[in-house]
């Protein structure tokens, strides 16, 4: 028989599939089925940096790994903030986590919201439901550098008033004189006195200059589709509309193939896409 | 003998009786030699000890959904075309453990343990032109992006490649259409062409690398003559002319993008069993999934990677259901990825024309026939972005 030769694959190269241990600092219930995790590196040291819009792969011991967008402030990268909904096996196990529990973290992965490109322009953020979480870092960035932007508009739609994510924070933003915040719900519950209807109905009367605005949209695909239509109707150019896409992901590195969408790997070419670049196949069923 | 060493790009002639020296030299250098063997009525790449393990005197008959071994009139060692399994199973194994994690009990911290084991150094004997291209394509996928798969890279970079030029084309071959064969041009350490007739049974060897030249120092050879090189060129052009299939690849990327709603997708979906055979036998298909397992104590966890296929419903599942719920969606994804979006992603086609997806499709769906049928009735539509909108 032939001799085989020792050959360590990880001696020289970082292994992008190997998670790093993190510790839960805080678990906060947001709404009935959503919660926020705050994580810190278990080894105490942190050289973690992320850009608004990027995501991490979070691993629960023995259960599995899921992609979750980072929803914290990119100006404070030491605290890793993730908001998600308990829908599957992994996210349900995640909901049971307590302070000091360990999780695995790989990341950050993916590209980011165009917060630099949007400088000097009106910023229009349109979020649906849990879609506020992935786009919140962009809003943090814009508010941290408020003087670099013109009008800032947040249009937010949820199913009911009880599903409003980060409610206190939304109310705080709404109280600011330099941000226009409009919230709408699909179904009103007493004592809601705000807007009722889909989020796209907020677009026509929003205070932004359609020729000088950058729009960032995050939410269910169908909501993105109609938001894009409404923005285009208002005259915003496809070049200035950005959307965040969601697809099945196993590796986040472009190796597993699951997140392919047309010619793109959502994990490495996205999750943020300029609408003009994906327009030919956006909305195609089964792609 | 007038010459004792060969340099890169030089040719030598090795007698059939001396080919064993090549395997011995590879073994002596510490390589695990993998080559074609006869198993389960098929040619299967597996570890070989000697030339006697090769399928001497066998050939194959291939067509849509058909593979049969047949006896040849001669004792050629490489007188068949592609076998069901490609070299993919060695460089990108069907199952591999990515890491382990361990903890004392449910309350304690856990640690991740990377895979630091040893990997074999393979010498592949009998890599065909299409397969050499497939290996290069997977190398691009796993090592040329923002991330590198360290295990693939280690296995790939260590592997010694003895390519073999095909002396006949198979019934489902179309490498000539895909510009990936039948002759190997680069990316090998040594390349053999089997020259067999009533008078002789020899191998013309071309040296492709310094590693290859070193190995040839252990193998007796004679200088190649011009008529030997001419014989190889005759074989190359005869094989290219004899391809069992052809595919018109003119502007194929845009053609498929434009025909995303061609009725042929429904037609092929009515035949396709979504069994994923085509993706498993394809030498470039690289998709994987992961499995998380724990032992009975619940304190030892492992993460495994295994081949996956875009033909499964789970593949594109996100909360609420599969993005590609219909067979039509999944066949379209596979073929459009292979022939079109791959070009956007990796600057080459994802198809090398090896024909395996045709041969091993249980219902004989033929990718070349599907492209041909679509070209017969191009439905290019300028308004695709508004079609199918809910």
Image (cartoon, coloured by chain):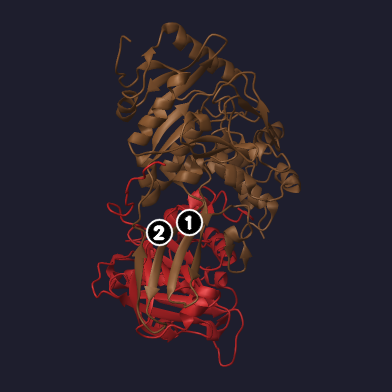
Chain colours: A red, B brown
Same chain shared by disc 2 and disc 1: yes
Image-quadrant location for residue B77: top right
The tag earlier along the polypeptide, 2 or 1, is 2
**Residue located beneath label 1 in the image:** A266
Give the structural element (helix, strand or loop) at label 1: helix
The residue positioned 30% from the left and 20% from the top of the image is B7
Q: Which one is nearer the viewer's eye here, B192 or A287? A: B192
Quarter of the image where the N terminus of chain B is located: top left
Residue B174: x, y in percent? 60, 28
Image-quadrant location for residue A123: bottom left
**Residue located beneath label 2 in the image:** A110
* Circle 2 chain: A
Mark 2 near mark 1, Cβ–Cβ under 8 Å? yes
Q: Which one is nearer the viewer's eye here, A222 or A98? A: A98
Give the structural element (helix, strand or loop) at label 2: loop
Question: Seen in the image, is A278 located left or right of residue B273?
Answer: left
* Circle 1 chain: A
Q: Which mark is residue B275?
A: none
Question: Seen in the image, is B385 located left or right of residue A218?
Answer: right
């Amino acid at each position: 028989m032939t001799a085989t030769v020792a050959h360590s694959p990880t001696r020289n190269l970082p292994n992008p599939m190997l998670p790093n241990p993190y510790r839960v600092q805080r678990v906060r219930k947001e709404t009935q089925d959503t919660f926020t995790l705050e994580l810190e590196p278990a080894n105490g040291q942190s050289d973690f940096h992320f850009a608004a819009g990027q995501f991490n792969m979070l691993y629960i011991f023995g259960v599995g790994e899921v992609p979750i967008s980072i929803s914290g402030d990119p100006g404070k990268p030491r605290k890793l903030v993730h908001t998600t909904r308990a829908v599957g096996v992994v996210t349900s196990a995640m909901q049971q986590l307590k302070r000091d529990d360990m999780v695995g973290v790989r990341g950050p992965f993916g590209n980011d919201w165009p917060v630099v490109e949007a400088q000097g322009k009106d910023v229009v953020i349109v979020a649906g439901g849990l879609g506020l979480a992935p786009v919140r870092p962009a809003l943090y960035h814009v508010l941290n550098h408020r003087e670099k932007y013109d009008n800032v508009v947040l249009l937010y739609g949820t199913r009911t008033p009880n599903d409003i994510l980060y409610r206190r924070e939304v109310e705080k933003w709404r109280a600011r004189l330099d941000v226009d915040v409009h919230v709408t719900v699909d179904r009103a519950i007493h004592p809601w006195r705000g807007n009722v209807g889909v989020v796209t109905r907020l677009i026509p009367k929003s205070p932004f200059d359609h020729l000088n605005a950058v729009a960032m949209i995050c939410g269910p695909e169908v909501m993105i589709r109609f938001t894009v239509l409404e923005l285009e109707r208002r005259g915003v150019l496809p070049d200035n509309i950005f959307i965040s896409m969601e697809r099945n992901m196993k590796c986040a590195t472009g190796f597993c193939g699951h997140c392919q969408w047309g010619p793109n790997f959502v994990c490495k070419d996205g999750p943020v896409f300029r609408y003009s670049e994906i327009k030919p196949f956006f909305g195609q069923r089964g792609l | 003998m007038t010459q004792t060493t060969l340099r890169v790009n030089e040719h030598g002639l090795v007698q059939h009786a001396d080919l064993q020296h090549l395997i011995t030299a590879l073994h002596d250098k510490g390589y695990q030699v993998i080559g074609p063997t006869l198993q389960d009525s098929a040619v299967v790449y597996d570890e070989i000890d000697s030339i006697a393990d090769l399928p001497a005197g066998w050939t194959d008959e291939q067509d849509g959904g058909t593979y049969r071994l047949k006896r040849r009139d001669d004792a050629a060692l490489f007188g068949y075309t592609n076998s069901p399994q490609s070299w993919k199973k060695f460089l990108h194994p069907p199952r591999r453990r990515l890491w382990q994690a361990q903890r004392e009990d449910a309350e304690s911290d856990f640690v991740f343990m990377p895979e630091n084991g040893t990997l074999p150094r393979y010498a592949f004997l009998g890599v065909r032109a299409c397969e050499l291209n497939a290996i290069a394509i997977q190398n691009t996928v796993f090592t040329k992006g923002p991330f590198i798969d360290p295990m693939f890279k280690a296995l790939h970079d260590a592997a010694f490649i003895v390519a073999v030029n095909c002396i006949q084309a198979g019934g489902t071959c179309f490498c000539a259409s895909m510009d990936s064969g039948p002759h190997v041009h680069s990316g090998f350490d040594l390349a053999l062409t089997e020259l067999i007739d009533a008078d002789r049974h020899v191998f013309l060897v071309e040296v492709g690398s310094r590693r290859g030249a070193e190995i040839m120092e252990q193998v007796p050879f004679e200088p190649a003559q011009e008529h030997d090189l001419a014989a190889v060129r005759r074989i190359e052009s005869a094989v290219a002319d004899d391809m069992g299939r052809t595919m018109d690849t003119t502007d194929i990327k845009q053609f498929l993008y434009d025909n995303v709603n061609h009725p042929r997708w429904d037609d092929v979906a009515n035949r396709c069993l979504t069994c994923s055979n085509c993706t498993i036998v394809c030498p470039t298909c690289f998709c994987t999934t992961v499995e998380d397992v724990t032992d009975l104590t619940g304190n030892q966890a492992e993460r495994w990677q295994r081949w996956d296929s875009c033909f499964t419903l789970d593949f594109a599942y996100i909360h609420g259901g599969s993005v590609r719920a219909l067979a039509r969606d999944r066949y379209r994804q596979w073929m459009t990825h292979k022939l079109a979006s791959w070009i956007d992603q990796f600057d080459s086609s994802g198809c090398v024309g090896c024909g395996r997806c045709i041969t091993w499709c249980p219902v004989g769906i033929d990718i070349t026939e599907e492209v041909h049928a679509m070209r017969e009735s191009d439905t290019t539509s300028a308004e695709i972005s508004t079609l199918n909108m809910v």
